[in-house]
Image (tube, rainbow, N blue to C red):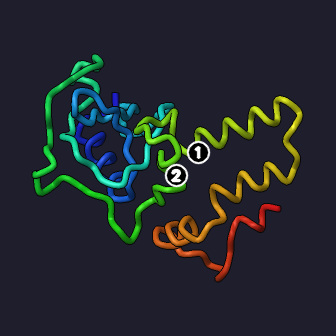
Amino acid sequence: MLPRELQLKIELLLRRYGLTSSIKHNKMDLINLQGADNGAVIDFGSFLVEEKFNYPIAYFYDSSGNASSTEKIMAPDDKRFVQPDVHSHVPFKIWGYSQSGKADSKYDNPYIWSHEIAESIRQGKATRQDVEQHIRKMFDRKEVQDFLNSIHPLTTPGSSCGRLF
């Protein structure tokens, strides 16, 4: 099991960028990170983009590894509580749940858009241009490029996902 201290450290780092592994339950954000004892993160769950974090943080798993812990470890008024950095925040209107309004990774924009294109491919309706447009919708936008540059400046000015095509 991923050590609890490391789960919290990773969650707080994610939150700097507006990301969270947490599951909302009873007005609490339950950290939902899995991994090995040595600190390797092995997480097959999903992550969510938030504009702001409003709920206390608790561990999803208790210290024995059982689900549904409700032990609050940090409240929003705690000085260690992290809000997204305005200069390096993942763009919510693209990667968040602005389309559905549901704070659930099964209803965020990437999930919806990816399932739409997958269904179109399955039905034999999608063209190469449709798939290209899907990728561009996710990556080749100024807001996304600005975010990516804020965390890892591109070596070639003006680079974009256009090189993929």
Q: Nearer the viewer, residue 4 or 14?
A: 14
Residue 30 in percent (x, y) is at 28, 33
Mark 2 lies on residue = 95
- Residue 60's place in the image compared with 132, above or below, is above
- Residue 51's place in the image compared with 109, above or below, is below
Residue 161 in percent (x, y) is at 71, 65
Q: Nearer the viewer, residue 83 or 52?
A: 52
Quarter of the view holding residue 48: top left
Residue occupying the far bottom of the picture: 157
Q: Nearer the viewer, residue 162 or 155?
A: 162
- Residue 156's place in the image compared with 58, above or below, is below
- Residue at 43 percent across and 49 percent down: it is 49
Residue 102 in percent (x, y) is at 43, 37
| 1 or 2: tag closer to the N-terminus | 2
Q: Residues within 10 Å of mark 2 (few under 14, many from 20)?
A: many
- Residue at 51 percent across and 33 percent down: it is 106
The three-letter amino acid code for the residue at tag 2 is Trp
Secondary structure under the numbered disc 1 in the rendered image: helix
Marking on residue 1: none
Quarter of the view holding residue 18: bottom left
Q: Are marks 1 and 2 in contact (CB under 8 Å)?
A: yes
Q: Is residue 109 left or right of residue 52?
A: right
- Residue at 19 percent across and 52 percent down: it is 81
Mark 1 lies on residue = 110
